């Protein structure tokens, strides 16, 4: 299973956002979502909100039917913030005795855990007495796929999930989809906020608009912050209360581009070039953030060069 990081996976089983404070930092898990957290933070969540936050146990995927059955990557596509916010649903008009198409909020905007029970075929075995044959029936296998992850499954399991998805009402279809396998190098949510914005800029600038993702928390000067808020409101930009909130929302948008084969992915070299291009950084981060990021990169490069020199000279 391809998750976002490699720590402890926990899941919010409630229908509201659960949050805790650890050393003055707020951590939150939105409703029905899966999060991969450092072990100490995950333990705090379970200890303080154990009724609603549970350690996620990966479900058992049915095994391949044979050694040559290929694996197919699928994903839970609910919670996609890039899809249309409204859909038209056929609804009965009792007053006019007719069926009308009514605009309704798109249900796929809400992240949901997809659960399906897959029935297995019966098995013919010899009777204990050895005088004949009998059939064994096995209980169905529960397949559960949380939002914002992709997972490889045997081809017959993928066909089953996609077929069940296609049997839903039209406005509910698309929760399960076949997706692009993970590439050798791509973004993940362990990246810094600034790096994710640069990656999004290269990935799909018009669709994600990374330049609109910013947080008041990165502005130390109150007057500059107020001016930025006014500009953001004038252009309908997205304003977030905290840096972690902004990063989480940006990551969701990047994830749905990563799994979509229609969009090309930037290479490691293209990303490094964009990080070094001051014009691109200013267009994404703004002057203040870009200058801060440039200083941090320069310090990091200097430390790396010093370490290499020490290794070379044997100091």
Image (cartoon, grey):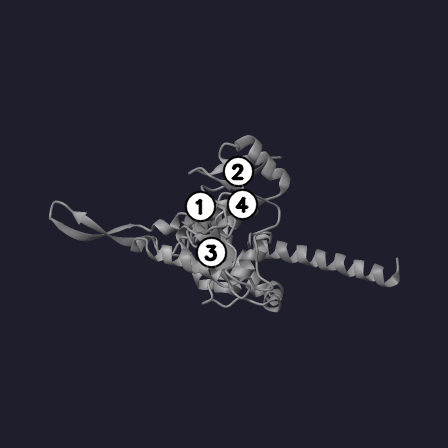
The residue where tag 2 is placed is 54
Q: Position of residue 120 (x, y in %)?
A: 44, 52
Secondary structure of residue under mark 2 = strand
The residue where tag 3 is placed is 75
Between 239 and 207, the one nearer to me in the picture: 207
Q: Which quadrant is the N terminus positioned in?
A: bottom right
What's the CA distance linking mark 1 and mark 4? 30 Å
The residue where tag 4 is placed is 35
What's the CA distance linking mark 2 and mark 4? 11 Å
What residue do we see at 46% from left, 63% from top?
A: 260
- Mark 2 and mark 3 lie on one chain; the one further toward the N terminus is 2
Are there few (<14), some (14-19), or many (20+) residues within 10 Å of tag 1? few
Secondary structure of residue under mark 1 = loop
Q: Are marks 3 and 4 in contact (CB under 8 Å)?
A: no
Q: Are marks 2 and 3 in contact (CB under 8 Å)?
A: no
Between 193 and 78, the one nearer to me in the picture: 78
- Mark 3 and mark 4 lie on one chain; the one further toward the N terminus is 4
Secondary structure of residue under mark 3 = strand
| 206 is higher (above) or lower (below) than 236 | below
What's the CA distance linking mark 2 and mark 3? 21 Å
Secondary structure of residue under mark 4 = strand
Residue at the right extreme, as displayed: 314
Between 106 and 191, the one nearer to me in the picture: 106
- Mark 2 and mark 4 lie on one chain; the one further toward the N terminus is 4
- Mark 1 and mark 4 lie on one chain; the one further toward the N terminus is 4
């Amino acid at each position: 299973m391809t998750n976002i990081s490699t720590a402890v996976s926990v899941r919010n089983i409630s229908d509201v956002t659960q949050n805790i404070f650890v050393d003055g930092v707020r951590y939150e898990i939105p409703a029905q979502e899966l999060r991969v957290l450092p072990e100490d933070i995950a333990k705090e969540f379970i200890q303080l909100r154990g009724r609603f936050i549970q350690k996620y146990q990966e479900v058992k995927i049915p095994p391949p039917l044979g050694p040559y059955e290929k694996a197919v990557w699928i994903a839970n596509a609910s919670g996609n913030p890039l899809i249309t916010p409204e859909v038209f649903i056929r609804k009965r008009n009792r007053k006019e005795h007719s069926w009308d198409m009514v605009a309704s909020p798109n249900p796929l905007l809400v992240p949901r855990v997809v659960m399906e029970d897959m029935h297995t075929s019966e098995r013919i075995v010899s009777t204990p007495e050895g005088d004949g044959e009998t059939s064994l029936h096995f209980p169905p296998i529960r397949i559960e796929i949380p939002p914002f992850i992709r997972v490889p499954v045997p081809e017959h399991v993928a066909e089953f999930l996609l077929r069940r998805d296609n049997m839903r009402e039209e406005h509910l279809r698309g929760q399960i989809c076949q997706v692009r396998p993970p590439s050798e190098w791509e973004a993940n949510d362990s990246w810094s906020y600034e790096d994710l914005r640069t990656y999004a800029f290269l990935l799909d600038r018009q669709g994600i608009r990374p330049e609109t993702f910013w947080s008041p928390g990165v502005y130390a000067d109150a007057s500059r912050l107020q001016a930025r808020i006014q500009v953001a409101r004038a252009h309908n930009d997205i304003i977030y209360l905290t840096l972690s909130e902004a990063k989480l929302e940006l990551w969701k948008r990047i994830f749905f581009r990563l799994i979509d084969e229609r969009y090309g992915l930037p290479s490691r070299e293209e990303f490094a070039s964009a990080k070094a291009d001051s014009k691109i950084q200013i267009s994404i981060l703004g002057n203040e953030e870009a200058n801060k990021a440039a200083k941090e990169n320069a310090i990091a490069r200097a430390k790396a060069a010093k370490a290499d020199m020490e290794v070379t000279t044997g100091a």
